[in-house]
Amino acid sequence: MTTEPTRASFCLGFVPGVTLAKWSRMWEERRGDLPLDVVEVDGDEPLAALGGDEPVVMLLGRLPLPTGDDFSVIPLYEERIVVVVHKEHPIAALGKDEEVALADLDGEHRHDLDPALSLAEAVAVVATGAGVAVMPQSLARLHGVKGTTHRFVADLDPTTIALVWPDGQLDDDIDDFIGVVRGRTANSSRSRRREDEPAPAKARKGSAPDPRGTGKGKTPAKGRGGPQRGTGRSRPRRSR
C-alpha cells in the first residue's frame, strides 16, 4: 500500500554515465507540482546515498550491486562494454562498428584494473599512448579525451542500468517515477489520484461523447431528427 508523500522535491541519484534528459522531461510534464532534483553519486558505492544523510529517494545505478533483500530493483537497459585506446593504436584502425575480442587485449596494460586510478584517470593515461582501458560505453564517452577512441569488446557481457530504492518504501511519488521509467502514460498511472486532481469524466460504454456538446443551440446529430445544417452541401433546384 502506498502512503501520501510529504517531500518538497523528489531527489534522484544517478551514477556517472546515466543520461536523464528524457525522464526528467517526462517528470516535469507530469509532476510540475514536485521539482526533480538530480544528484550524481559515487559510482563505486552508490547505495550509500540511499537511506543515509543524502536526501536521495531513488537511484539509477549500474548493476551488479550488493542490494540483497534490502532494496527493490527494476532493470532498465543494458550498455555494452568497450575498450578505450589511443588513436594510433592498431585497434583504432578498425571500423567503428567492428568489434575486438578480449583475447586481443592480452599483453596490454589495462589501466582500468589499477585500483589507484579512477576511470577518468585511466583514460587520461591511455591518451598518452600507454595501455588501454575497458569500461561501459557511456563512461568511455563521458571520460573521452582528445587522442582516444573506443571499440566494442565482443565477448564481455553488458552492464545493466537499474532503478533502485529501499525495499518497503513506496509512495505516490515513487510510483509515479516508476511509471516514467517504465514508459507508462500519464493516464495509465497506477498512483492514487490526488485530492486536488479532478476525476476524469466517464463516457457510457459503447459510445463516444459528442464533441459538439449537448447544450442549447447545438446541431442535433445525424439521424436524430431536424434539418442537417452546415454540411456544405445544397440540394439542386428543380427547373420549372
Image: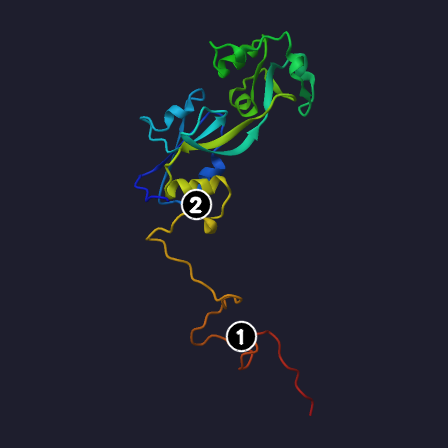
**Quarter containing the N terminus:** top left
Three-letter code, disc 2: Glu
Q: Quadrant of residue 98?
A: top right
Q: Height in image: 186 above or below 38?
A: below
Q: Position of residue 148 (x, y in %)?
A: 59, 16
Tell me, yes or no, whether the two marked residues, 1 and 2, touch with CB atoms within 8 Å. no
The residue singled out by tag 1 in the image is: 221
Q: Position of residue 68 (x, y in %)?
A: 44, 27
* Left or right: 17 in relation to 5: right
**Quarter containing the C terminus:** bottom right
Three-letter code, disc 1: Ala
**Number of residues whose C-alpha sits closer than 10 Å to that of mark 1, classed few (under 14), some (14–19) or many (20 or more):** few
The residue singled out by tag 2 in the image is: 29
Q: Residue furthest toward the bottom?
A: 240
Image mark count: 2
The colour style of the image is: rainbow
* Left or right: 212 in relation to 234: left
Residue 195 is tagged as none
Q: Residue at x 61, y 19 (%)?
A: 150
Dot 2 falls on a residue whose secondary structure is helix
Dot 1 falls on a residue whose secondary structure is loop
Q: Residue at x 37, y 26 (%)?
A: 49
Judging depth in this view, the residue of 69 and 130 nearest the camera is: 69
Q: Height in image: 198 above or below 59?
A: below
Q: Residue at x 33, y 43 (%)?
A: 3
Q: Residue at x 67, y 18 (%)?
A: 100
**Number of residues whose C-alpha sits closer than 10 Å to that of mark 2, classed few (under 14), some (14–19) or many (20 or more):** few
